[in-house]
Image (spheres, rainbow, N blue to C red):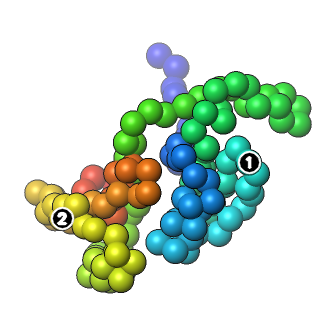
Amino acid sequence: MQTVPRISGVLETSLYVSDLARSREFYERLCGFEVFFQDERMCAMGVPGGQVLLLFRRGATDQPAPAPGGFIPPHRGEGALHLCFAIPLGELTRWATHLRELDIPLESQLSWPQGGTSLYFRDPDNNSLEVATPGLWPNH
C-alpha cells in the first residue's frame, strides 16, 4: 500500500455571500482580518496561522475564472454554510463580550464532553459561525 502524500493544513476556506462589501466589513470588524485581495468576484482575507478566508459573491464562481497560467474551476455553496474559528481557552469571555458589543446575537453556547466550549452566531448571509476553545476535537 502506498503512503498518502502529506498535507500541511487547510490553506483556504470559502463562504458565498450576497453583498461582498458588507461581508468584508463584517469580517474586518468581527475578526480584524487583513484584506489580501479584492475584486468584483471575491475577497481574500488573511486568517492567523497562515490561512485564508475567501468570500465569493454568490453566482460569481459558476463559470471558470481565467488566471495566470490556467483557470480556476467553477464552484459554489448553497444555503447557510458553517465555519469554525479556533480560539484560545482564555478568550471565550472576551468573544462573548465582543459579539454583544457588535450587536451580533449569540445563537448557542455549547460545552463539549472533551472540555471545549463553542459560541455560535450568524454572519449577514446567515452562515453559521463558531468560535471554539480547545477540547472540541482531538487536534484542538
* Residue beneath the point at 31% across and 61% down: 121
* Residue beneath the point at 73% across and 25% down: 64
Who is closer to the viewer here, 102 or 95?
Answer: 102
Could you tell me residue 77's position as x and y percent? Answer: 49, 34
Drawn side of residue 119 relative to residue 9, left or right: left
Could you tell me residue 140's position as x and y percent? Answer: 33, 59
Q: Secondary structure at mark 2?
A: strand
Residue carrying label 2: 109
**In the rendered structure, which amino acid carries the disc numbered 1?**
Glu
In the rendered image, the vertical position of residue 1 relative to residue 40, given as above or below: above
Drawn side of residue 95 relative to residue 64, left or right: left
Q: Secondary structure at mark 1?
A: loop
* Residue beneath the point at 88% across and 37% down: 68
In the rendered image, the vertical position of residue 41 relative to residue 135, given as above or below: above
What distance separates the C-alpha of mark 1 from that of mark 2? Answer: 35 Å
Could you tell me residue 56's position as x and y percent? Answer: 61, 44
* Residue beneath the point at 38% across and 63% down: 86
Who is closer to the viewer here, 87 or 66?
Answer: 66
- Tag of residue 106: none
Are discs 1 and 2 less than 8 Å apart at CB? no
Who is closer to the viewer here, 28 or 48?
Answer: 28
Disc 1 crowd rating (10 Å Cα; few below 14, some 14-19, many 20+) is few
In the rendered image, the vertical position of residue 105 relative to residue 59, given as above or below: below
Looking at this view, name the residue that lies furthest to the top. 1
Residue carrying label 1: 40
Q: Nearer the viewer, mark 1 or mark 2?
A: 1
Q: Quadrant of residue 116?
A: bottom left
**In the rendered structure, which amino acid carries the disc numbered 2?**
Gln
* Residue 11 appears in view: no
Drawn side of residue 130 relative to residue 19, left or right: left
